[in-house]
Amino acid sequence: MTTEAIAPLDARSGQATSGTVFDIGYQPYTGRREGRGRSRLAIFKDGFRTALGFGRGARAKVLPWFFIGVLTAIALVMAIVAGAAERLGGPGTAAEANLPSHSDFYGIASIILFVFAAVVGPELLCPDRRNRVISLYLVRPLNGSDYILSRWASFLVVMLAAAWLPQVILFLGLSMGDAVPIQYLRNHWLDVPRFLLSGAVMAVYATTLALLTASFTTRRAYASVFLVGLFVITAPFTIGLAEELDGAPGQWVSMFNLTNIPVHVNDVIFSDQSEITEDAPARELGARMLVIWYFIWTLVPAAILWWRYRRLTP
Amino acid sequence: MTAGQALLAVERLTKNYGDVVALNDVSFTITDGITGILGENGAGKSTAIKILLGLLQPTSGTATVLGQNASQSIAVRARVGYMPEHDCLPTQVSAAEFLTHMAEASGLPPAMARTRAADTLRHVGLFEERYRAIAGYSTGMKQRVKLGQALVHDPAFVFLDEPTAGLDPAGREEMLALIRKTHREFGISVLFSSHLMADIERTCDRIIVLQDGRLVQSGEVGQFTRETETVFIEVDSNREGLVAALKKRGVAVTVERTGLTIEGPDESVYDHVRDALVEAQAPLRRLAPRRRALTELFERESGNVHANGAA
């Protein structure tokens, strides 16, 4: 171990002062080692920062914040329109005009939420495998399951924020736009747990599908294009085919509209119909089947995702 | 862990990939210090390291690291470091950010992780460039970041897989100096894999030689050096007379196309050579110590292994 003494100069006189700076060389770490819990938290924190572009260059921040901005803007426009209707047309005008509200938000914004997941989600997994950083994680006190669960949780938090933030803004906007805000809060407080639950339904679905797709490629662009294509193509394809097929076959084809799967659950939670699902034949299969279908499309991809990373651990 | 106590132990380790045998009944122990694991490409060096790190499950046998079974204990990984041969660095983040993250991933609290990251980057010679994105680093700087992430959590033992790969001669010298410093100044024991005998010889205290998945030699580097050293003699005429004079003095000599080679010489051989040259009246053109090439050594060891196998 080297110990080097350096005598600093006094700034005014230029003379060597009596103070001494020591390079004490390498110091062994004697502090706490927090083990697997800290390792998982580190992966979680890194995933969160990666998704939002923190600690990266400006380019890494553009996409996530653009989508969050668009989602927030939609909620703001909805709140402003409802508030203007109340102010200009008098109390109750917004409700009478059936203007879009909390139950409609995910029907309107779901595709943006899914594209956000498709574009940002793969960034949490693909570079780690492409740059082979994952081999450094797996020699630390965690295994493949810890890694993927931490990454999934970190992206879920980002998706929850992206899903809830506009609804919170909408709720505040509608409250303040109402002629009697306290009365609005009294009448609509139940919307809060509903949109929290519905937002969680959207976030879990989008997170799981985005990360599962990302687990099959090392290129973020491939995963993003595939996912966007999947959401964009299945919607018109299943709608068209379901119209051609009457009865049960049409209803089941309609169930494969990937954009609608969590929106059906949103409709069940709000006991209302979104604009994009009100004509979907899948509705005829009933609320229970729609919820079961949602769980199948969430749990099965989650299990495959977990299995793919679990096998990295010998 | 006291000096001389086994930090790593491998017992009857075998690893098969289908029909390919990567490691075949290999046993060795590694104590405090710098140990080199030498072998040609495909000899099983990386496989052995990956089993010791718990990244691969052995087909049979056991691998123990710091007293714990490598393939079963996750906790032991908090006390070991690994520098892989391949590229393994993210491009968008800075070295400071990356090492802080890796220290946290090894279980260090965030404040300590930041301090350790800065200290480690200073020790590996990257303090000034620590806030630049890794994408802009040279190969040598990237190798330093790779070494830094292996040391940032102050492991008791560090595995370095071909740390000089891709470096120019100056970069190689610096990396070898850093490896020596890792043990001598930081007190961290090292297992250093390479296919370059010169790197191992100049850096390590002990050596393990693998060939085709088999252990062919292990021991002190000094002993290995003596065994692989030769003396090359070239004369202008009367080579046969010189060979006879050397044999008369009990010196084993191999006749090659351009000269004579004496294997594993001790100090007295030079006296015998002098006397033999005088006796044979052979004009000396060249007398030089020479190191046996790695491939040549493996051919010899392979011959021994096969001969022993046949016996």
Image (cartoon, coloured by chain):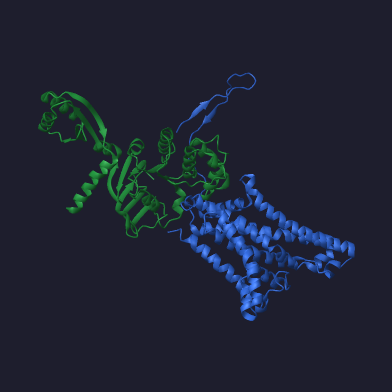
Chain colours: A blue, B green
**Rendered-image quadrant of the N terminus of chain A:** top left
Question: In the picture provided, is A186 more to the left or to the right than B8?
Answer: right
Residue closest to the far front: A244
- Do we see residue A38 in this rendering? no
**Rendered-image quadrant of the C terminus of chain A:** bottom left
| Res B259 quadrant in image | top left
Of A311 and A242, which appears nearest the observer? A242
Question: In the picture provided, is A310 more to the left or to the right than B211?
Answer: right
Q: Is residue A244 above or below residue B213?
A: below
Of A192 and B67, which appears nearest the observer? A192
Return the x and y of residue B171 as percentages of the image width and height. 44, 35
Of B36 and A71, which appears nearest the observer? A71
Return the x and y of residue B9 as percentages of the image width and height. 34, 50
Question: In the picture provided, is B260 more to the left or to the right than A30?
Answer: left
- Do we see residue A22 in this rendering? yes
Disc tally is: 0
Of A44 and A266, which appears nearest the observer? A266
| Res A11 quadrant in image | top right
Return the x and y of residue B68 as percentages of the image width and height. 39, 54
Q: Is residue A193 above or below residue B183?
A: below
Residue closest to the far bottom: A247
Which residue is at a point 24% across and 38% down the rendered structure image?
B227
Return the x and y of residue A44 as percentages of the image width and height. 57, 54
